[in-house]
Image (cartoon, grey):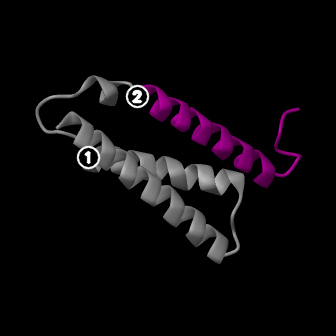
């Protein structure tokens, strides 16, 4: 049973990644940052949709670290975009 749930998680995540890469390429707006953000959203959605109700398996506990790193990466992307938008007069350096 745990292997089946793991496979369902991996299949769902791979389907999300392929669909998002295809959609971004069809919209001609594919970039590393945008694909990273859409992939992080997919990881969070698939993680929540495949979560068991009463017991958390060991492999799901290890998902915390990639999710945490993804959120930190998302924060870096947001800060970089904000700094690009702000005029140079506003920045203290």
**Residue 82 in picture, x, y percent from top left:** 71, 48
Between disc 1 and disc 2, whose residue precedes?
1
- Residue at image point 69% right, 69% down: 29
- Residue range (magenta): 64-93
The answer to whether residue 1 is magenta is no
Quarter of the N terminus within the rendering: top left
Q: Say which of 93 and 57 sits in front.
A: 57
Callout 1: few (<14), some (14-19), or many (20+) C-alpha neighbours within 10 Å? some
Q: Which residue is mark 2?
A: 64
Q: Which residue is mark 1?
A: 50
Circle 2 sits in a helix, a strand or a loop, which is it? helix
Dominant secondary-structure state across the stretch colored magenta: helix
In this view, the residue farthest toward the bottom is 26
- Alpha-carbon span between mark 1 and mark 2: 15 Å
Q: Would residue 45 be found to the left or right of residue 88 on screen?
A: left
**Residue 35 in picture, x, y percent from top left:** 61, 55
Quarter of the C terminus within the rendering: top right
Q: Say which of 59 and 36 sits in front.
A: 59
Total marks shown come to 2
Q: Which mark is residue 84?
A: none
- Residue at image point 49% right, 31% down: 66
Q: Would residue 4 be found to the left or right of residue 85 on screen?
A: left
**Residue 10 in picture, x, y percent from top left:** 38, 46
Vertical placement of residue 18 versus 82, above or below: below
- Determine contact: label 1, label 2, CB under 8 Å: no
Q: Would residue 56 be found to the left or right of residue 68 on screen?
A: left
- Residue at image point 70% right, 52% down: 32
Circle 1 sits in a helix, a strand or a loop, which is it? loop
């Amino acid at each position: 049973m745990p292997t089946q749930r793991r496979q369902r998680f991996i299949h769902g995540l791979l389907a999300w990644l392929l669909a998002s890469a295809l959609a971004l390429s069809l919209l001609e707006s594919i970039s590393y940052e945008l694909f990273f953000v859409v992939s992080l959203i997919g990881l969070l959605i698939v993680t929540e949709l495949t979560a068991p109700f009463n017991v958390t398996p060991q492999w799901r506990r290890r998902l915390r670290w990639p999710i945490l790193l993804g959120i930190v990466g998302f924060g870096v992307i947001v800060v970089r975009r904000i700094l690009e938008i702000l005029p140079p007069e506003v920045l203290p350096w």
